[in-house]
Image: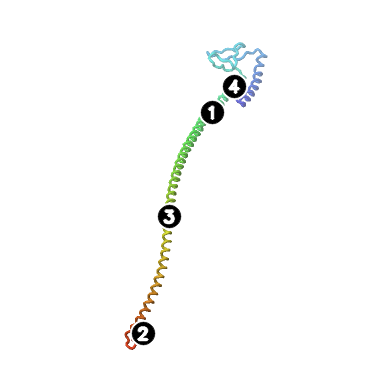
Amino acid sequence: MTWDGGLKARTVAKHTKGAKSKLLTPALGSNAKEPPIATAGGSLKEKGPKSTILPEEETATNITVPPTNAAAVVSSRSRILNTTRENRATNTLLSTSTLQNPLITMNTEGTTNITATMEELMGQILVELRAIKVSQEETRRETKEQLNQLNTHLTLLSTRVSQVEQRVSDLEDTNNQVETTTSRVQFELEYLQNKLDEMENRSQRSNLRFVGAYRRRWKLAHL
């Protein structure tokens, strides 16, 4: 029973108590009998003091006997109203709990699905990260091998360049020697050319002197 229903029941019981006392006071003051009531067979039966049936009493078949006075009617109706309200509140709570259970189940299932999806995504991310790590290691290894090969090739090229530089230096020295020798040969050729010219001149002079008749004696004497 709710607080509102209890308050209304107490209010109705208070009013019905006053009405019941007002209704019962004339009957007790005078010896008037209560009006007859209808029985189950349809005959009328006067209600005596021993045959009074209260609203709270029930028959052997759990059937409530209807009240006979106004106060009992009001009390019975208030009780029925309170029972109806209690049943309605109980049904409301049951319906709310019935609705809450699927919601809780749906929330639990949604959380489970989200957790499973997140775990699956995390697994995929870890697999991809492992693949990326392996790929990076392979790339690093290949890059290291290529760097080693490049260093070896550069070392060979440096050696060959050094050899070429040495040969160029040797060629320069040889060229210098050739130039020096050429200059000396040229100088000697010039000297020989001068000597030949001088000898030719002397030869010509000697021939002229020797051939000429008037200088024959002087030629012989000079020689």
Residue at horizontal 53 percent and vertical 14 percent from the top: 61
Marks 4 and 2: CB-CB under 8 Å?
Answer: no
Q: Earlier in the sequence, mark 3 or mark 1?
A: 1
Q: Residues within 10 Å of mark 1 (few under 14, many from 20)?
A: few
Amino acid, disc 2:
Ala
* Residue holding disc 1: 97
Q: Secondary structure at mark 1?
A: helix
Amino acid, disc 1:
Ser
* Residue holding disc 4: 79
**Could you say where residue 208 lies in the image, as x and y percent from the top left?**
33, 84
Q: Is residue 55 left or right of residue 112?
A: right
Q: Earlier in the sequence, mark 4 or mark 3?
A: 4
Amino acid, disc 4:
Arg
Q: CA distance from mark 4 to mark 1?
A: 26 Å
Q: Which mark is residue 221?
A: 2
Query: Image quadrant of residue 87?
Result: top right
Q: Residue furthest front?
A: 221
Q: Earlier in the sequence, mark 2 or mark 1?
A: 1
Q: Earlier in the sequence, mark 4 or mark 2?
A: 4
Q: Is residue 209 above or below residue 23?
A: below
Tag nearer the camera, 2 or 1: 2
